[in-house]
Image (cartoon, rainbow, N blue to C red):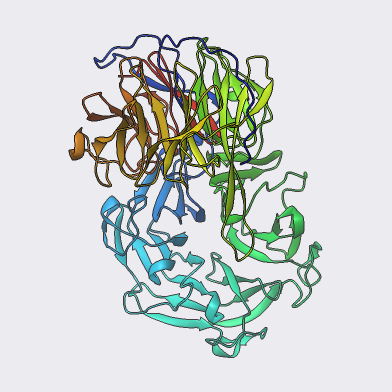
């Protein structure tokens, strides 16, 4: 950036460390705190994850196919987590089979099993689940006790997508759409696989027996009580029926004529029919992709009448449907949504969230859980306990009482507060020219307590290291008013004095992520797998870490997977956000590392007694015994931190 000095006001001497992540300097204790909790400060849980829980406290990563058993339990193929999840009628979500984030192929019970991007689930009359394990190109069976085996073990579905939608009849026959081959497969209880209808690699729109029939892109599949199989053909905008004898006919829609006309099945039109499900009354529900409205739910009655359901105008609110299942009592329809929720639609119910919480795409001021954040990524605390949060082009202010307001329209990647309550921001303004390297220019700003924004620049460069800052990822301020900027691209920590002199404070051999300052004037920094210490003379040494993992210990025996944020309390303890393991770690001045919050490998937000669960903690900020965590759609607080 071109640097033109803007004089700063005289900074008060810090009573405690002023650093990236901020701090009020209130005293803290080293002993473990009784009654430590993690709580929601502001915003609402949202976005992807793998945490079990009730309702919105659970999280998914791309939920796909969905099935319902006789007791009303839902089973969901959690594609991105490589698991099968179970949701009870009381909205309690558990992991039924597979291990979150562990893809592969493995039979076994519960968490011992492995899947690779499972997309569809179905249930038979005995309560057995069937899974289209797309990444492994197999069909899997799960008993009611959770034991997973390979059903289609002698047949390998073909690259690139493998089996997609799946349905089962009352005697355990399984029907699978194989859209890239334009066929529908039958998997018998013995594991024998055959082509029920269509011809491999020969798309078309032809009714007739078995191999003489043709499909374009067979998508969803459902089976009625009489054993008829129904297939949605997204290419030709139709719903096809396959009798138990294998004869294919067109039930509804007009081949090659997209639309959303209701009426008799011979006159009705569909745009792009996707997943389907039957209720106990014999109504067939079809998810139809309809223009900018995304999706409508269409119902085909046993009498052959197509309507948009429900008829009171309730919307299917979705960002992309994964699967659909009908309540046994006919009251509503459940559907999974790629925005990481399972929703329910019914007459008078406009696609309510049943489990999980969709990503936030809005910014709203308000109190505590009524406020909304779009991308809370960095935070700092002033002496009065106000939290300033960098949130997608805005600086949001949260009072100790949880009142959220918009403080300034300033983009920021990192923030810090000095003892005079001036807020400093660092931002990488990047352009991404086609076929050329990305170019970034660092922008530093100071925002006074009254909200006045000034850009900070340099008037000199006494060590001849240049006046450019390229990609600032962390920022800290000391008691004398010097700013320290972690410049990831330059591989250096730069220092900007109150007089405007920009120099290189320390060169960095690895990837910088964040910095913070302790009361003694030492900088602490997180990089690839470690926490480093930089003395006031610029000497760099290892404090803790030395390789990937979530291992507590001292010095180089400890392990971090992806430390991205750091803040320091008044006694020199560092608190580190380890984003990929979803943890907050504590590092003492002697380098002893302990995990204080989060559960390794579990992504989501579970408030309550520690350790709880955290959803992508990026940065940390400290005020006394409180640790603040910006996590995308919300800001959490660890109270009475150990």
**How many circles with numbers are drawn on the protein?**
0
Q: Is residue 335 visible?
A: no
Residue 554 % position (x, y): 18, 32
Instruction: Give the quarter of the figure containing the C terminus.
Output: top left
Residue 281 % position (x, y): 61, 55
**Furthest residue toward bottom:** 212
> Picture quarter containing residue 606?
top left
> Picture quarter containing residue 409?
top right
61 left or right, relative to 10: left
- Front one among 79 and 503: 503
* Residue drawn at x 74%, y 71% as measured from the top left: 253
* Residue drawn at x 46%, y 21% as measured from the top left: 22
- Front one among 470 and 120: 470
642 left or right, relative to 557: right
Image position of 264 with respect to 188: above or below = above
> Picture quarter containing residue 231?
bottom right
* Residue drawn at x 50%, y 11% as measured from the top left: 383
Image position of 469 with respect to 39: above or below = below
Residue 625 % position (x, y): 37, 14
- Front one among 314 and 225: 314
509 left or right, relative to 181: left
- Front one among 64 and 250: 64
Q: Is residue 581 visible?
A: yes
567 left or right, relative to 530: right
Instruction: Give the quarter of the figure containing the N terminus.
Output: top right
Residue 255 % position (x, y): 74, 78
């Amino acid at each position: 950036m071109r640097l033109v000095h803007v004089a700063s006001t005289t900074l008060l001497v810090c009573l405690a460390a002023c650093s990236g992540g901020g701090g009020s300097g209130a005293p803290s204790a080293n002993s473990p705190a009784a009654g430590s909790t993690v709580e929601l400060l502001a915003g609402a849980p949202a976005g992807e994850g793998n945490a079990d829980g009730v309702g919105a406290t659970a999280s998914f990563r791309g939920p796909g196919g969905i099935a319902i058993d006789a007791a009303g339990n839902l089973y969901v193929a959690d594609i991105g987590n490589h698991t099968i999840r179970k949701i009870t009628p009381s909205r309690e979500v558990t992991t039924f089979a597979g291990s979150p984030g562990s893809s592969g192929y493995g039979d076994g019970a519960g968490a011992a099993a492995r899947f690779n991007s499972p997309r569809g689930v179905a249930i038979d009359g005995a309560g057995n689940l069937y899974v289209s394990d797309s990444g492994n190109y197999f069909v899997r069976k799960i008993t009611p006790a959770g034991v997973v085996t390979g059903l289609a073990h002698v047949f390998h579905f073909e690259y690139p997508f493998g089996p997609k939608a799946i349905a089962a009849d009352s005697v355990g026959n399984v029907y699978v759409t194989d859209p890239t081959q334009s066929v529908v497969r039958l998997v018998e209880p013995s594991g024998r696989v055959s082509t029920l209808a269509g011809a491999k690699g020969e798309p078309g729109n032809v009714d007739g027996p078995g191999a003489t029939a043709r499909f374009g892109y067979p998508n969803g599949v459902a089976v009625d009580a009489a054993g008829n199989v129904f297939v949605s053909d997204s290419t030709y905008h139709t719903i096809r029926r396959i009798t138990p004898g294998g004869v294919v006919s067109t039930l509804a829609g007009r081949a090659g004529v997209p639309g959303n006309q209701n009426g008799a099945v011979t006159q009705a039109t569909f745009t792009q029919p996707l997943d389907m499900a039957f209720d106990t009354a014999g109504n067939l529900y079809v998810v139809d992709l309809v223009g900018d409205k995304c999706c409508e739910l269409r119902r085909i009655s046993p009498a052959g009448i197509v309507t948009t359901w429900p008829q009171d105008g309730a919307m299917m609110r979705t960002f992309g449907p994964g699967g659909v299942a009908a309540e046994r009592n006919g009251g509503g329809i459940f559907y999974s949504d790629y925005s990481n929720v399972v929703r329910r639609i019914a007459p008078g119910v406009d696609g309510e969230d049943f489990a999980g919480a969709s990503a936030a795409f809005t910014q709203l001021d308000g109190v505590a859980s009524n406020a909304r954040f779009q991308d809370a990524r960095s935070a700092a605390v002033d002496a009065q306990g106000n939290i300033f949060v960098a949130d997608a082009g805005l600086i949001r202010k949260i009072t100790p009482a949880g009142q959220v307001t918009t403080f300034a329209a300033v983009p920021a990647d990192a923030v810090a507060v000095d003892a005079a309550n001036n807020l400093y921001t660092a931002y990488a303004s990047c352009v991404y020219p086609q076929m050329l390297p990305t170019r970034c220019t660092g922008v530093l700003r100071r925002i006074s307590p009254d909200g006045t924004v000034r850009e900070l620049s340099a008037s000199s460069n006494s060590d001849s290291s240049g006046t450019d800052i390229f990609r600032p990822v962390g920022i800290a301020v000391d008691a004398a008013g010097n700013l320290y900027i972690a410049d990831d691209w330059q591989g250096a920590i730069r220092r900007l004095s109150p007089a405007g002199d920009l120099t290189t404070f320390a060169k960095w051999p690895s990837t910088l992520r964040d910095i913070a300052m302790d009361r003694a004037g030492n900088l602490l920094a997180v990089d690839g797998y470690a926490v480093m210490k930089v003395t006031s003379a610029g000497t760099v040494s290892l404090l803790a870490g030395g390789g990937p993992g979530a291992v507590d210990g001292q010095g180089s025996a400890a392990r971090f997977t992806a430390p991205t944020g750091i803040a320091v309390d008044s006694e020199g303890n560092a608190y580190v956000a380890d984003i990929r393991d979803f943890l907050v770690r504590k590092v003492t001045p002697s380098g002893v590392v302990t995990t204080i919050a989060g559960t390794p490998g579990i992504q989501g937000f579970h408030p309550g007694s520690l350790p709880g669960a955290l959803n992508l903690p990026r940065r940390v900020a400290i005020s006394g015994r409180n640790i603040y965590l910006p996590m995308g759609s919300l800001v959490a607080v660890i109270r009475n931190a150990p």
